[in-house]
Amino acid sequence: SWEKNLEIKEKEVAEVKNLVLLPKDLNFNILAKGIKNFWFSPDGKKIILFEEDKSSSLPPLSPSESSPTKPKEEESWALKLYDLEKNIKSHLIGEADVYSKGADLMNLEFSEDSKEIYLEVGLKEQKKIFTLKLDKLPPQLVEKEVSPSSKNILASQKQNQDVYYLDNSGYLFKNELRLNEAPFSVQSETKYTLGVFQDFLFLTEGENLYSFSPDSKSLEKFFEKIDGLKISPDNRKLAFFSSSEIWILFLKDGETKKAGEKLFLVRLSEKIGDVFWLNSGYLIFNSGDNLKIVEIDGRDRIQTWDTANLPSPKIYFNGSNRKLYILSRE
């Protein structure tokens, strides 16, 4: 059900756009079993599946070689590629293909064109980055070399033809133009990421989110304990969230909000896992074991709906095929 009290003014139209009525019961089909983690490609056509590889085993490690993140009784892993267009799952690479004595997969990222994935792996006491070329048969694994110039760049983001980056001196650049007058105080061993959304530029430093002010030509704190930023399909709104709160930043003037205004949506006691735009008027997210949907219409009260309950879900909403994917123990 949906209801809202709207203010009616003389000679003005009060309207509700893009209203979505949600089914009470959601039906889920099992896509694959035994999956430990998954990553979607930017084009929404591929899924990388992280599985235990029962077909191969690694040689036992000595106590000095054992990884703190892996038991001594080695469980080998493998990456599989699930093609959503062909509905086919194929083997990509196994742990022994990276290193015969075992490797810990620490992070995985797709290239912007979805043709490559970058693997950050731990080999004994060292960390290496590999590129796996998905458009080659068989897929080619090569170690990625870090250029001397890239070592000075802490974070970068490409937006259309412009490249934004933060160097290790604390200066923020748009192409070769320096944006901030005074250097930003950068911290060692801290992860930095840049996000460019319409006329807004954000820097994430660990759990702190900063926005760039063209007036002061400096980075100003915007939000603490940030977990993610997600832009809406119409590119007019930005969802930003922590483990307990979800907010909206309006990037363009709208019917009820001006560009730069913020809207608080929800605060929850159970941890928020991830947030996705269902469309430009609704967000879908998981809080604890509950799958929830919240509207962003701030008139009257903001409505939230519980749609499903699944153990420890990891969710992904694929805007390409309008399907929700959930990894759960059940």
Image (cartoon, rainbow, N blue to C red):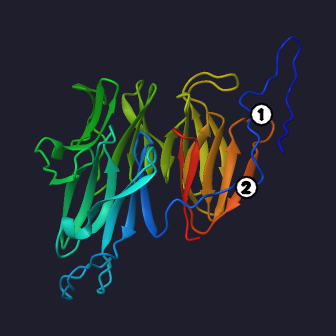
Which residue shows up at 60% across the image and 31% down it?
261
Q: Which mark is residue 299?
A: 1
In which quadrant will I find the C terminus? Answer: bottom right
Find residue 150 and report its image quarter: top left
Is the residue marked by circle 2 packed among few (<14), some (14-19), or many (20+) residues within 10 Å?
some
Q: Identify which amino acid the numbered label 1 is placed on.
A: Arg
The residue shown at (62%, 24%) is 258
Q: Position of residue 279 (x, y in %)?
A: 62, 36
Q: CA distance from mark 1 to mark 2?
A: 20 Å
Q: Amino acid at mark 2?
A: Asp
Q: Quadrant of residue 10?
A: top right
Asked which quadrant contains residue 214, the reply is top left
Residue extending furthest bottom?
63
Name the quadrant of the N terminus.
top right
Between 36 and 208, the residue placed more toward the observer is 36
User: Taking 312 as reference, is 213 above or below it?
Assistant: above
Compared to 328, does 194 lie above or below? above
Residues marked 1 and 2 touching at CB (< 8 Å) = no
What percent of the width, then of the height, locates residue 322?
58, 41
Q: Which mark is residue 306?
A: 2
Residue 35 percent across, percent down from the top left: 45, 66
Residue 191 visible? The answer is no
Residue 327 percent location from the top left of the image: 53, 62
Who comes first in sequence, dot 1 or dot 2? 1
